[in-house]
Amino acid sequence: QKEVEQDPGPLSVPEGAIVSLNCTYSNSAFQYFMWYRQYSRKGPELLMYTYSSGNKEDGRFTAQVDKSSKYISLFIRDSQPSDSATYLCAMRETSYDKVIFGPGTSLSVIP
Amino acid sequence: KAGVTQTPRYLIKTRGQQVTLSCSPISGHRSVSWYQQTPGQGLQFLFEYFSETQRNKGNFPGRFSGRQFSNSRSEMNVSTLELGDSALYLCASSLAGSGSGSYNEQFFGPGTRLTVL
């Protein structure tokens, strides 16, 4: 079993839809939970990070962490074609530890 | 401020050869991490260098090695290339060492696409 699991997709939604992306993990020592977005032929870019459990909102994006269930989610509201990319969840035990990535979910937002 | 740069962007090698990839971090960043990305395994951590010392290491064979120079630039070397080494190699730089009290965000470069024939 991999340390971090993520639905691989691909996921295809119409413009304006709400998108839910999810990851599960097995290491209870993870404290930092991140979501990265990766466009084709580019490196990943950090969208959001959350420390420990709880919710965090940034514009159309909301990240949720449930440490008791070892489950994290990213919600995208009013999805746009420019949101079409691969979304990677990532985790680390401390702010300076190695980052463990999920396999990524490919998202297409259709105009 | 310039982002993370990686050279070369594309590379084709044959089995048994060795290869060296280069990463220039964002100015002022002292930590450089290397990752391998493949369709089957996803993004996997190789190693991290901070102030010229390897600070973290992933689960890759000894054929994969790296170093960091005093100007924080880093190189990664893969010896005796295998077909399975074909991948996108990404480096990421970050600002701080431990104990800064703020999140240590990593900034990724565009990657080097290595093809082993």
Image (tube, grey):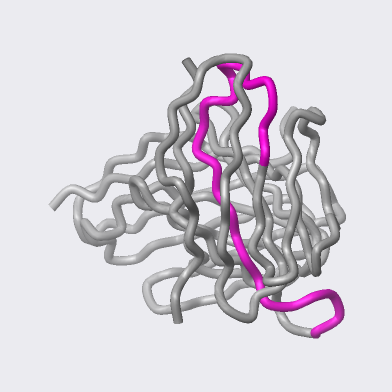
Residue B19 drawn in magenta? no
Say which residue appears at 39% left-offset and 78% top-offset: A59
Query: Foreground residue, A45 or A19?
Result: A45
Where residue B28 appears, as percent x and y from the top left, is: 63, 81
Above or below residue B33? Residue A9 is above
Query: Foreground residue, A92 or B100?
Result: B100
Where residue A99 appears, as percent x and y from the top left, is: 71, 54
Where residue A63 appears, as percent x and y from the top left, is: 55, 66
- B74 displayed left or right of A63: right
| The image quarter in which residue A50 lies | bottom right
Say which residue appears at 35% left-offset and 46% top-offset: A41
Where residue A2 appears, as percent x and y from the top left, is: 72, 32
Query: Foreground residue, A104 or B30?
Result: B30
Query: Foreground residue, B34 or A94?
Result: B34
- B9 displayed left or right of B88: left
Residue B91 drawn in magenta? yes
Residue extending farthest left: A111
- A53 displayed left or right of B20: right
Q: Which residues are magenta?
A: B77-100
Say which residue appears at 75% left-offset and 27% top-offset: A1
